[in-house]
Amino acid sequence: MKTATIPQRAYGSTGLSVSLLGLGAGQIGDGKLDEAHVGRLLNEVLDLGVTLIDTARGYGLSEERIGKHIAHRRNEYVLSTKVGYGIDGVADWTYDCILAGVDRALKLMRTDHIDIAHLHSCPQETLERGEVIDALDRCVSDGKVRVAAYSGDNEPLVWALASGRFRGLMCSVNVFDQCAIDKVVTLAGKRGIGLIAKRPIGNAPWLHPSQPNGQYCEQYWLRMKAMGIDFGADWSDIALRFTAFTEGVTSCIVGGKNIDHIHSNIASIARGPLTPDVVSKIRAAFAQHDDNWCGQV
C-alpha cells in the first residue's frame, strides 16, 4: 500500500507512466550490502510511490537483487536496464550480445519483459552501423522489451536523438551538467521521447570542503567552484528540483542505499519547481563559465 504520492509523468508517447523520482539501483549492487537491508529498501521504495527502477548489466548484484526482492510486485513498477556488454563468450556491442544481454536480464530479474532497455553508453560509430539497434528492435518485436532506448551523452546522444530510432533516452542533467538541455532534453520532450535524467544532484560535490581528488564527483566539484554559486544547506533540494522540473525531463533517477535519503528526495520533489529567478541564475552561471564542459558519461 502506497504511503506517499510522487507525481507520475507520461514517458514520452510510449504509453508508459513513471514517477518523477526514480530509483537508480547501482548502489544496491554492492555485494557488501546486507541482503535483508536491500530487500527492505526496494520494497519501501515501492511503498513510497516510486514506480521507476533503473539498473544495468554493469551494476554488480543489482539485477539479481531486483528479481529476488520485488519480482512479486512486478506490476507496480516500470523496469529499466542497460545492455551491450559483459556476456561471457559473446563479443561486446554485437547483435548477439544485445539479444543475450536482454535474455540474461529477464532471467535475473524474474520477469517476462523489460519495459525500457538502453544501449549503455554505446559509441557513436557502433550506433551508426545499426547492428545493435536492429537487435534491440528485434527484442521489442519479440515482446521481450517494450521501449528501445539509448543511454549516454555528448555526440552519441545527439546522434541517437536525430536517428529517430529510439523512443527513450537517458543522459546527465544537473546544475553542473547542462549541455544536453538545449541540444537534446527539450527537443526530446517535444518529439514525444521519454527522457530519464541521471546524476540529478551532480554526485553532491558540495559535501566536499576541498577538491575530492580522484573521486566520482571531482569534475563537478571543479565546475561548482568555477560557477561561483552556493546554496549552502539547500544544495541537495535545489539541485534535485532544478533537474526534475527541467523541460523535457520525464523522470530523474537518484541512487541510494539509505531510505532516509529517499524520503528527503521525495520531500524535495513535493516542493515543486524552483522560482524562475533561481533557475535563471543557475543557467546563467553555467553558460558564463562553460569551458567546453561536456556531459559526464
Image (cartoon, rainbow, N blue to C red):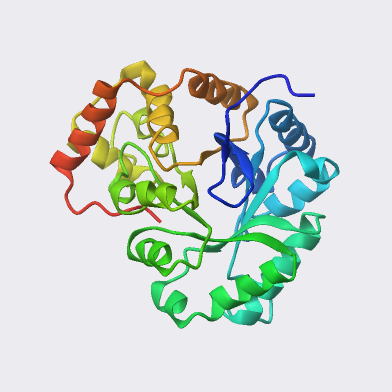
Residue found at x 53% / y 58%: 167
Q: Is residue 247 left or right of residue 62?
A: left
Residue situated in front as seen by the camera: 115 or 83: 115
Foreground pick, 98 / 273: 273
Instruction: Identify the residue at horizontal 32%, vertical 20% (top origin).
Output: 275
- Tally the marks: 0
Q: Residue at x 19, y 34 (%)?
A: 285
Q: Decide: is 136 above or below 131.
A: above
Does 21 sit left or right of 178 as displayed? right
Work out whether residue 139 can be spotted: yes
- State left or right for residue 224 relative to residue 108: left
Give percent across and percent down for residue 294: 28, 54
On the rendered image, what quadrant is the C terminus found in?
Answer: bottom left
Q: Is residue 139 above or below residue 28?
A: below
Q: Quadrant of residue 108?
A: bottom right
Name the side, left or right, on which 208 lies relative to 167.
left
Residue at the far left: name it: 288
Q: Where is residue 23 shown, x and y percent of the image? A: 60, 39
Residue 106, given in percent of the width and then of the height, sits at: 76, 61
Q: Quadrant of residue 18?
A: top right
The residue at the point 74 percent across, 47 percent down is 66
Q: Nearer the viewer, residue 125 or 14?
A: 14
Image location of residue 180, percent across then percent down: 33, 50
Residue 92 in which image quadrant: bottom right
Residue 93 visible from this viewpoint:
no
Quarter of the image that includes the N terminus: top right
